[in-house]
Image: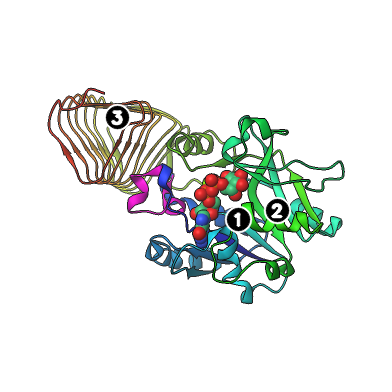
Amino acid sequence: MKAVILVGGLGSRLRPLTTTIPKPMLPLLNRPFIATVLAHLRRYGVNEVILSTGYLPEVFTDFLAETRAMGMSVEVVTEDRPLGTCGAVKNVADRLDETFLVLNGDILTDINLTNLIDYHRQKGAVATISLTAVEDPTSYGLVPLERDGRVSSFVEKPSWDEATTDLINAGTYVLEPEVLAHAPLGENYSFERGLFPYLLDEDMKVYGFPASSYWLDIGTPEKFIRAHKDLLEGKLPFDFTGTEIKSRVWVGEGTTVDQNALLYGPVVMGDNCTIESNAVIIGPTSLGDGCHVSAGARVEGAICFSDCRLQSGAVVRNSVLGRGVDVGKQVHIDDFAVLGDNLVIGEGNWLRRGIKVAPGSTLEPGTIRF
Ligand code: GDD
Ligand code: MG
């Protein structure tokens, strides 16, 4: 079976990380997020994939060699302008002549795809939408069901008044090619506001498949950090690479950890990192290749992409640092700060409470005490 993965979004809520890397290519434990999505598909025998891109497509093309190494056949198709979620699939309709899957490219899940596809066939559906229960459905697509599992309506981003169920669209669909005949070609058109409501109006068989599997949309800083924590804590399958130097602490090649550094797993470090004596690293934490944590610096519950440098007395907690961020002495980064690539943070700055700092800037010592 083929799958189309939608990866054309701008990832605005994850800026500034997504100014240079599209959301599905952001590193997740030092591997592009999409690699985890592909590994999940492969586990269910889905090896043929179309990546529907629009934003920064070259980043996906550069990744194709890795997908071949995974034994998958992945094609990148790029839109000249955003076609919307359904328009993107209509755009590749000529390659889809059998039942196929569509996936939102920012979902971390271990849903059982065999059960989903079997359910779709058993119901004789034209479209089956995987569903998950969430506490606050207002930032998702609300999908109330009839008793027999048929979808009764589809309300994208409902208000609280409309929230009659906690079941939302989990962003994995099984579709019959014939449904695409109802989508306009070359126009911006979405599943959520266009095709699904249309199929329901036409009384076509659209079913919902509630699943209790792990599910997370990684589209905000809080959720991006949570995805790391959940994988590090073993809540869903992940193929850890590197050497496990102590319980749940994995390090890549060429990484040196001083014997007087304090490490509390789960922690993943890439290749060629240096952890000095009296540095403290508390999991769940992920460090990319080439990171340097100086004596007396502390990292806790944080994500640093490659080549970050933490000087002595720096503290980084519950935050995300892009590539090549230089963190000066006594800097405090906490509470879901998101820092862009190649930032230089002078001594004594405090960056907290969801602050976002653009890539490439330099903060003079003591400028921000937020
Ligand atoms: N190719 C392409 N073209 N892809 C697109 C486009 C487009 O024009 N627009 C969005 N995408 C991709 C995004 O990259 C993302 O992977 C996926 O489509 C969904 O877009 P988001 O922007 O992440 O949507 P959302 O999270 O607000 O809502 C969607 O996901 C929810 C589950 O997380 C909807 O499908 C909701 O109904 C759903 O509940
Ligand atoms: Mg999303």
User: Toward which corner of the image does residue 48 lie, by quadrant?
Assistant: bottom right
Query: In the figure, is residue 364 to the left or right of 163?
Result: left
Q: What is the CA distance from the residue labelled 2 to the residue labelled 3?
A: 60 Å
Of 133 and 73, nearer the camera is: 133
Query: Which quarter of the image is occupied by the N terminus?
Result: bottom right
Q: Residues within 10 Å of mark 3 (few under 14, many from 20)?
A: few
Q: Quadrant of residue 44?
A: bottom right
Can the viewer see residue 109?
A: no
Residue 291, numbered circle: none
Quarter the C terminus occupies: top left
**Which residue lies at the image location 15% right of the left edge and 32% below the top edge?**
346
Tell whether label 1 touches label 2 (CB within 8 Å). no
**Residue positioned 50% across, 42% down in the render:** 218
Q: Is residue 157 above or below residue 3?
A: above
Q: CA distance from mark 2 to mark 1?
A: 18 Å
Which stretch appears magenta?
14-28
Residue beneath label 3, please?
259
Cβ of mark 1 under 8 Å from ligand 1: the answer is: yes
Q: Kindly report which numbered mark, 2 or 1, lies closer to the viewer in this rendering.
A: 2
Residue occupied by mark 2: 197
Q: Which residue occupies the extreme bottom position in the image?
A: 94
First in sequence: mark 1 vs mark 3: 1
Disc number lying in front (1 or 3): 1
* Type of amino acid at the residue the image marks with label 2: Pro
Quadrant housing residue 72: bottom right
In the rendered image, residue 19, in percent from the top left (x then y), is placed at 33, 51
Give the labeled residue for mark 1. 103
- Mark 1 residue element: strand
Q: Amino acid at mark 3?
A: Gln
Q: Is residue 288 covered in magenta?
A: no
**Are there few (<14), some (14-19), or many (20+) residues within 10 Å of tag 1?**
some
- Identify the residue at horizontal 85%, vertical 55% (top origin): 123
